[in-house]
Image (spheres, rainbow, N blue to C red):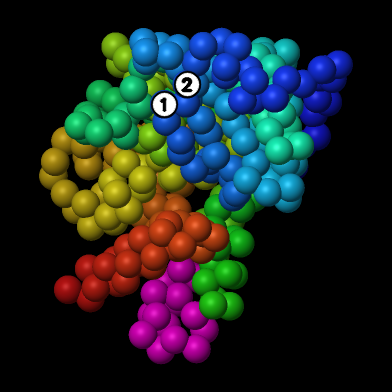
Amino acid sequence: MTTIPMPRTTHRAGLAELISDRCAEITDVRAGSRLQTHRLTICERGSRRALFTAVIADRDEATAAVEHEGRLLVELRRGDYGPASLVAPRHVGVAEHIGRPVLLTSPTAGPPLGSAGRRPTRRDVAAVIEWLIAIWDGGRPDSGPTDLGATAVDALLTRHSSDADRADVLDRLCVARARVSRARVPRTVSHGALSLDRITVARDRVTGVDDWGCGTIAGDPLRDLAAFAVTCAGLRLDFLLKSRRSVAAALRAGVRTGLAALGVDGRLCDEVLLLAVAEQAAATDEQRRQAGLQALDAFLALTKE
């Protein structure tokens, strides 16, 4: 992971003190993309106007993840990474909570695509794909084999090698990984955990992307492309691959457009999506892991019909 210098501060106010001084209150608490981190939305008391987001580590081991996100946000602004720097939150300060640093960022304007009562449209999908391709245009000249699914497939083989019921799906994953591993991709800004609840779209344009805890300035662009598609579809590969609904068609077209922009064979579309689901199934978070495993099992049943 790329190391970026962290700006030093001479004094860190306690988070509780900061909230009290600003006459604010915590209005929302969400798990972060990095394990053992949480994100608190701090609003003006009584008005619900968001003042900032506080990223906290639940344990000492997660402190490095919080500090990494702070360094990344600073670098995105300093390095002029185009669309990524324009929609990422600003690093606005560092506080302290239970002896651990707390990252303070600007709030994301507007509700994300994953908000209750909102379903993404084909125009939302097109806006996200357009944003991703714009980020890739500013990528580094060096490239290398994609690592999409590599760690996930190894983890699933280790966990389920003795599970006869999953032998077929593990074989499919190994074949998919072997095919996709031959693709070379540029190293670009990568969010690392792109999903509906982290993206805000307004007027057919991405206006905010939150939670860069898994991000890097030199990552694998296939991971963001595939993760967005499968999470947008609720991990349902049957919907992604077979549905005629406009959102499903937009996702399929968007993935193929993204692959073409990266110089990757469009015939790898199905394998890329399958490996993205495998990454969910290999997650440390139990809820994501179970959802991913169920999606893989459903995919295998689909292919046997």
Image coords of residue 11 (percent x, y) = 82, 17
Asked whether residue 289 appears in the rendered view, the answer is yes
Which quadrant: the C terminus? bottom left
Image coords of residue 182 (percent x, y) = 58, 56
Residue with the mark numbered 1 = 27
145 is higher (above) or lower (below) than 4: below
Residue with the mark numbered 2 = 25
Q: In the picture provided, is 216 more to the left or to the right than 193?
A: right
Image point (25%, 24%), residue name:
123
Which quadrant: the N terminus? top right
Q: Which residues are magenta?
A: 160-177
Asked whether residue 68 appears in the rendered view, the answer is no
Residue 221 in the magenta stretch? The answer is: no
Image point (34%, 22%), residue name:
111
Image coords of residue 191 (percent x, y) = 56, 34
- Amino acid type, residue under disc 2 in the picture: Glu
Image point (37%, 13%), residue name:
46
Q: Farthest residue in the left direction?
A: 244
- Amino acid type, residue under disc 1 in the picture: Thr
